[in-house]
Amino acid sequence: MTESPPAPPRSPVPASWDRRIALAAALLAACERNPPRPPPTAADLAGGGVWIAHNLGCERGCDRLRRGDRILAVDGRPVSSGAELDAIGLARGEPVSLRITPHRAGTTRDVTLVATPSDPPLLTVGAAALDRAPAWAREPLFARAIPALGLVRRTDPHELLTGRQLHGRAALLVLWPPPTRLAERRARDAALPALHARLQAHHEALQRAGVYTALAGFATRPLRDDPRTRGPLPVFDHVAEAPQFGVDRVDLHAELFGRAHAAAIVILDRRGVVRFHARGFPAGLSDTIDLAVDFALHALRDEPEAAATELPPPPPPGRR
């Protein structure tokens, strides 16, 4: 009986596939560290500590931390703000002991974390500072970090502003999508001058406070070309979902605007954490803008405080 020849050796997996597998594994690990969470309520933030908005990963220990966990103490020292966490420093290249209360689990535990000094592992904010947002400004992006958004200006000067570029500075963004119905589209187009004028009126004060402010829309013609949007306020004519430009993916229509394609107001602090996300104008256009600006000017601090100051509920629609 003739022996069949041996099967040829299998060719090795191409290097490109190795990279794809490594990337897929990294994305899977990131998903496990940053599971979907509903926007936190006051009850979720009760008890203080420091809220983990996003877990970037580290050499050791980060696999035991999840988005929504709270850090209560570092090496036995209680913490309540991002400023305290910055002063202590988690990324030292040596073991750091964290006392953690898991998201809605109620049982504290200790986690040992090791992170390289050049690679901070966590994006955080004090739970008390996060809890300053009113209930009506806790839409799905609230308490998430560096959303993967790109604001595009297609007219001169051409510009792309990304979530990563906003990290390190506070920002107030008003995002203005077109409604699906023609009548609503016309009504929103008619409201554009009032919206722009209200933002323009606050622009100088926000600049002095170091809060970047911009208006961005999904216009059929570039907003920048609309004579009603002239002035120093940055105006972008497109909002894009851009996974490569942030750490947290955003489903634009489902999470940012909702089914009604309502306008969105998003305020980020200097750590890139979304501290305010409102859909539409629950207090009417002018008052909602004024309340958002007041929040950006006075509520973005993340320092140890005896008590947090919360914005009052919005006045009823129609009041100016």
Image: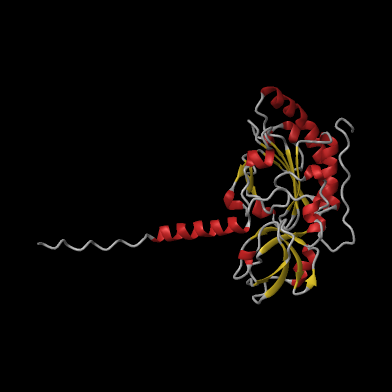
x 76%, y 43%: residue: 232
* The quadrant where residue 136 appears: top right
| Chosen colour scheme | secondary structure
Q: Locate residue 268 relative to residue 297 in the image: left or right.
A: left
Residue, far left: 1
- In the depicted structure, whether residue 1 falls above or below residue 310: below
The percent position of residue 61, horizontal first and vertical second, equals 63, 69
- In the depicted structure, whether residue 66 falls above or below residue 236: below
Residue, far bottom: 94
What number of labels is visible?
0
x 72%, y 54%: residue: 273
The percent position of residue 234, horizontal first and vertical second, equals 72, 43
- In the depicted structure, whether residue 1 falls above or below residue 96: above
Taking depth in this image into account, of 46 and 208 the one nearest to the observer is 46
In the picture, the quarter occupied by the C terminus is top right
* The quadrant where residue 16 appears: bottom left
The percent position of residue 288, horizontal first and vertical second, equals 83, 39
In the picture, the quarter occupied by the N terminus is bottom left
The percent position of residue 94, horizontal first and vertical second, equals 65, 77
Asked if residue 141 shows in the view, the reply is: yes
